[in-house]
Image: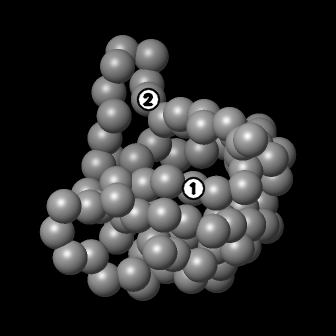
Amino acid sequence: MGKIILSMQISLDGVVSNEEQWMTLSEEIFQDYLEYYDTVDMIVVGGNSYTSLAQHWQNAEYSKNDLERAIAKRMNEIPKVAISNSDLELIWRNSR
C-alpha cells in the first residue's frame, strides 16, 4: 500500500501565496525539489491550484534553468489526480 504525503510550500511566517507572488527559488531548492519528485508516484491536487500549476510546469519545460527544466519534465510525467467540485479541463499531461 502506498503512502499519502502532504507537501506544501509555505514561508516561515505562514504565507501560502498565489502564482503572482511565488517566491524565487535558489539552485539548492531546485535540487531538493528534483530529488523529492523522483520519489513521488502520484500528485493529488485541488481544482483551484490545478490550472495554474499545470500551466507553470508545462511552460517550465522551456526554462533557461536546467534544474527547473528537469523538475518540469518529472512533474509533467508523474500521474496526477485533480479533485474539484466543478468541471475541470484536464490540460496537464497524465491527469485524470
In the picture, measured across the screen, residue 83 lies left or right of residue 32, that is left
**Numbered mark located on residue 73 in the image:** none
Look at mark 2 in the image and give the residue it sits on.
Answer: 10
In the picture, measured across the screen, residue 25 lies left or right of residue 65, that is left
Counting from the top left corner in percent of width and height, residue 20 is at 30, 55
Residue 25 falls in which quadrant of the image? top right
Q: Which amino acid does label 2 sit on?
A: Ile
**Numbered mark located on residue 43 in the image:** 1
Specify whether residue 56 is in view: no
In the picture, measured across the screen, residue 48 lies left or right of residue 83, that is left
From the viewer's perspective, is residue 87 above or below residue 28?
below
Q: What element carries label 2?
A: loop
Q: Is mark 1 on a helix, strand or loop?
A: strand
From the viewer's perspective, is residue 39 above or below residue 79?
above
Please tell me which of labels 1 and 2 falls first in the chain: 2
Counting from the top left corner in percent of width and height, residue 72 is at 66, 68
What residue appears at the point 27 percent right and 76 percent down from the top-left corner?
Answer: 88
Q: Which amino acid does label 1 sit on?
A: Ile
Counting from the top left corner in percent of width and height, residue 16 is at 33, 34
